[in-house]
Every structure is written in C-alpha cells, then in structure tokens.
Image (cartoon, rainbow, N blue to C red):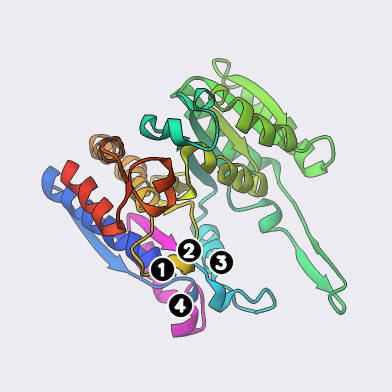
Amino acid sequence: MKARIAVLPGDGIGPEVVGHTTRLLSVIADKHGHDFTFVEGMIGGIAIDETGDPLPEETIKICEEADAILLGAVGGPKWSDPTATVQPERGLLGLRQHFGLFANLRPVKTYPALLEHAPLRAELLRDVDILFVRELVSGIYFGDRREQGSGEESHDTMRYTRAEVEQVANVAFRAAQGRRKKLCSVDKANVLASMRLWRRTVVDVSEDYADVELEHLLVDAATMHLLTRPGSFDVIVAGNMFGDILSDEASVLAGSLGMLPSASLRSDQFGLYEPVHGSAPDIAGQGKANPIGMFLSAALLLRYSLQLEAEASSIEAAIDAVLADGLRTADIVGQGGEAVSTEAFAEAVIAKL
C-alpha cells in the first residue's frame, strides 16, 4: 500500500514522540511491503512563532493532500496568555472543523502488567476496555462566546443540532455492534436544553440498533461510575466537553494520560490521530515522555484510515510485550519496573516488531 501521511509535530514533547512514531511506521512499512511518505507541517505555538498563525495555509494544504494526519501536541506556557488573540489550541480546533472531524474515538484499556500498582484497586481494573466516542466539532467549544464590557461578564454557548447528534450517535452504535453491544450515552438532560435534545436524538437513533443495549447516565453520575465500576462500560458516547473531561478522567484506569491514543474521524476513512496528552513542556527534551499514546495513535491510523488491521495489532501487541518485560517511562515508573528514556522504550517496542 502507498500512503501519504501529514506529520504535525507541534510543541513541547510533540516532536520527540512524533519522531519515534514515524520511525515505528517506517519499520512497519518495510516489514509489510508498504510505501509510506511523511510530509511535515507546522501547527500550534511553533506555527505562531514562525507565521503568526496557529494553522497556516501551507499546513492545511499538506493535510488536504494526505491520507491521514499524525499530530504530536500543541501549546505551552510561552503561548498561554488567555487574553491573546492567537492561541495554539485554535490551530487544533481549526483543523478539526476544516476537515469535519466530528467523531473522536478514545480507547482506554488496562494492562495486566500494571494492575497491581495502579491508583485504583486491581480488582476494579481487570478487563477494563472502554471506547469513548466524543462529539468533536460542536457543543460548548464551538458555540457563541463573548466577554462583555470590561470582562466582568462572559458567556459560552453549548449548542447542538439534531443532525450533529445523529451522526456521532450512529458512529457509537456501530462501534458497540462490533464490541460487546453496550452503549452508555452521557448527558446533563436534567438541567441543559441542549442535552435534552441530545438524549431524545440518541433514543431515536437507537431504534435502528435493536441489538445494542442503551444506558443513559447524567455526567456527574458517570464520573463516579467510571471509578467504581469501570469494567461495566463498553462504548460511551458524549458531547464535546463532557467527552473531553470523562476520557481524561479515565486515564487513571490505564495508569497515565501518556498511555491514551485518539482518532478524530469524518464520514470517510480520513482522520487525525494524536495522543490524548498535552505538550508537557516541563519535560520536553529530557527523554521522559511516554511514547505509548503516540504509538497507539499510529496503530489507530493504520486501522481506520489505511485499513491495515494486522499491522495495527502488531504495534499494540509489541507495547503489551514491552510493558510485560517491566520497562516503564517516568510517568509510570511508580507502577513497578525501572524508568527508561523515551528513546529506550521506543527502541524496545520497535525491537518487538
């Protein structure tokens, strides 16, 4: 297979984990007879510094000509002034909106090698395998926002249309059909009008998926149940803000935010793949970053955009094997084993392939 992949290293630890990931994908390509071309572009803080724009036109063009996008992370203290007219995160939001990446998939699974040292009791974590489906291009992050007058009053607007809820609900139901056939829809329908629309629409969509068991949870209850009965969840679908918060909370189940990947998809095979973690500027350049979230994001790229299931599974199996061998990066060293550098961990995964 020939594939063109847009590579956006971004800020902080982004260039480190992305660099190891393109090497990982090159090894996969060589082993399986594929031809992957990597074309690099700027996004986020580095793009602001170089062009004044967190999402330059040249980067959009690179992505438009690609089969998929691989992204590191954006942001950092240098660009963190909330009153600034140009912020790194606007580049990421703009990318999602430009390409219509409406469904964000965030898988969370636990690793047997880490269970006994996890923050929660091991018996709660066995067999945890959750897929979050987060709506990504609407909701409160994209609604009308305004600071009024001298800044003493401001507002953000959570808005949804029926069509927006329908399209992400269909993705979630189809995902549940291929898994354990259980879907939990999270909302705040007891308070928010937009969430009452959300719940009504999900119920209507469920009529086309009679084989999937549907559960509704208010977001405050969902936060509790994620930590008290995580093994009971299969697929969780939620709006933009709630999905963001819940999937970050679920990182404690895997042991670290650095373990979690994500895929942002539109209706065809095109997608943006990035780890859930941020740019972590405090450890940038120190070899302390965990590459697992980035590696697993590359596996999702192979699975969803390139339809290369065996290759994707081989990356996931290699990571399982390296963790079973006792290797740990700094963020999970407290869970047993010895801390190794980003490069050493990456090399171990590549060796397992």
Segment tinted magenta in the rendering:
46-73
Marks 2 and 3, the one that precedes in the sequence: 3
- Name the secondary structure under disc 2: loop
**Can residue 124 be seen in this snapshot?**
yes
- In terms of depth relative to the viewer, which is nearer, 156 or 116? 116
Could you tell me residue 258's position as x and y percent?
Answer: 44, 50
For the point 52% across and 43% down, the residue is 251
- Name the secondary structure under disc 4: helix
In the displayed image of the protein, which residue is found farthest to the top? 211
Spatial CA span between label 1 and label 2 = 6 Å
Could you tell me residue 66's position as x and y percent?
Answer: 33, 59
Q: Is mark 4 in CB contact (under 8 Å) with mark 3?
A: no
For the point 74% across and 31% down, the residue is 200
Q: Amino acid at mark 2?
A: Ala
Could you tell me residue 60's position as x and y percent?
Answer: 43, 68
Foreground disc of the pair 4, 1: 1
